[in-house]
Image: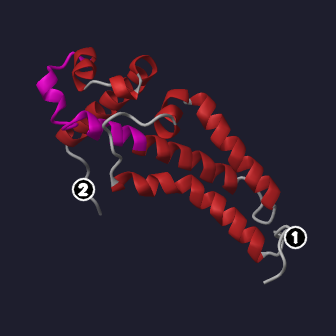
């Protein structure tokens, strides 16, 4: 049995979510390079020094937004793959590709954060890798499953080994 979260933990989680939501909205107007913790704090009605308790730096906030974006995209791709029969490889591939496109269209600023121009001075930490790999892992699994089932035949472009 796990203990329930304390009121302080719930408030912290809610404020962290609110900060991230405001930052995502600000991506649309300032872009990732213009994202400012002070501006987010001002919009929340919070003194700028208080926001640093939640995100020690702009890069930490960017990292959280990137991880959230990759996880949201990964969830969409995983759901799309799971909605198809396991042995219908073309349908799975198509569903996954459409899920990526649909997510990108529904979240253009987050998609730009993930796949657009690099943010000057920002270097994504290793923390982003597991979330980043979710959609690619699904695509790789589809190809591997098709190969194992004999449904994927390489093109006859080279002489046999």
Query: Few, some or many C-alpha atoms within 10 Å of disc 1 (few <14, some 14-19, many ≥20)?
Result: few
Q: Residue at x 28, y 15 (%)?
A: 43
Instruction: Label 2: state its secondary structure.
Output: loop
Q: Residue furthest right?
A: 156
Q: Residue at x 62, y 59 (%)?
A: 138
The answer to whether the residue labelled 1 contacts the one labelled 2, judged by CB atoms less than 8 Å apart, is no
Q: Earlier in the sequence, mark 1 or mark 2?
A: 2
| Magenta stretch secondary structure, dominant | helix
Q: How far across and how far down the image is residue 15, in percent?
A: 26, 31
Q: How far across and how far down the image is residue 86, in percent?
A: 75, 64
Q: In terms of image quadrants, where is residue 148?
A: bottom right
Quarter that holds the C terminus: bottom right
CA–CA distance in space, label 1 to label 2: 60 Å
Q: In terms of image quadrants, where is residue 159?
A: bottom right
The span shown in magenta is: 44-66
Q: How far across and how far down the image is residue 129, in percent?
A: 42, 56
- Residue 131 vs residue 6, the one in the foreground: 131
Dot in front, 1 or 2: 1
- Residue 16 vs residue 143, the one in the foreground: 143
| Residue at the spot of label 1 | 156
| Residue at the spot of label 2 | 3
Q: Residue furthest front?
A: 159
Q: Is residue 160 above or below residue 29?
A: below
Instruction: Label 1: state its secondary structure.
Output: loop
Q: How far across and how far down the image is residue 127, in percent?
A: 34, 54
């Amino acid at each position: 049995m796990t203990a329930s979260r304390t009121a302080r933990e719930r408030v912290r989680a809610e404020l962290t979510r609110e900060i991230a939501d405001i930052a995502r909205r600000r991506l649309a107007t300032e872009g990732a390079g213009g994202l400012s913790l002070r501006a987010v704090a001002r919009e929340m009605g919070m003194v700028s020094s208080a926001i640093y308790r939640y995100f020690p730096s702009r890069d930490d906030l960017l990292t959280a937004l990137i991880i959230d974006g990759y996880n949201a995209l990964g969830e969409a791709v995983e759901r799309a793959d799971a909605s198809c029969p396991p042995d219908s490889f073309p349908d799975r591939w198509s569903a996954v590709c459409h899920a990526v496109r649909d997510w990108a269209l529904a979240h253009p600023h987050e998609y730009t954060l993930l796949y657009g121009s690099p943010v000057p001075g920002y270097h994504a930490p290793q923390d982003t890798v597991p979330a980043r790999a979710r959609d690619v892992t699904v695509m790789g699994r589809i190809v591997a499953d098709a190969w194992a089932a004999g449904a994927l035949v390489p093109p006859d472009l080279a002489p046999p080994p």
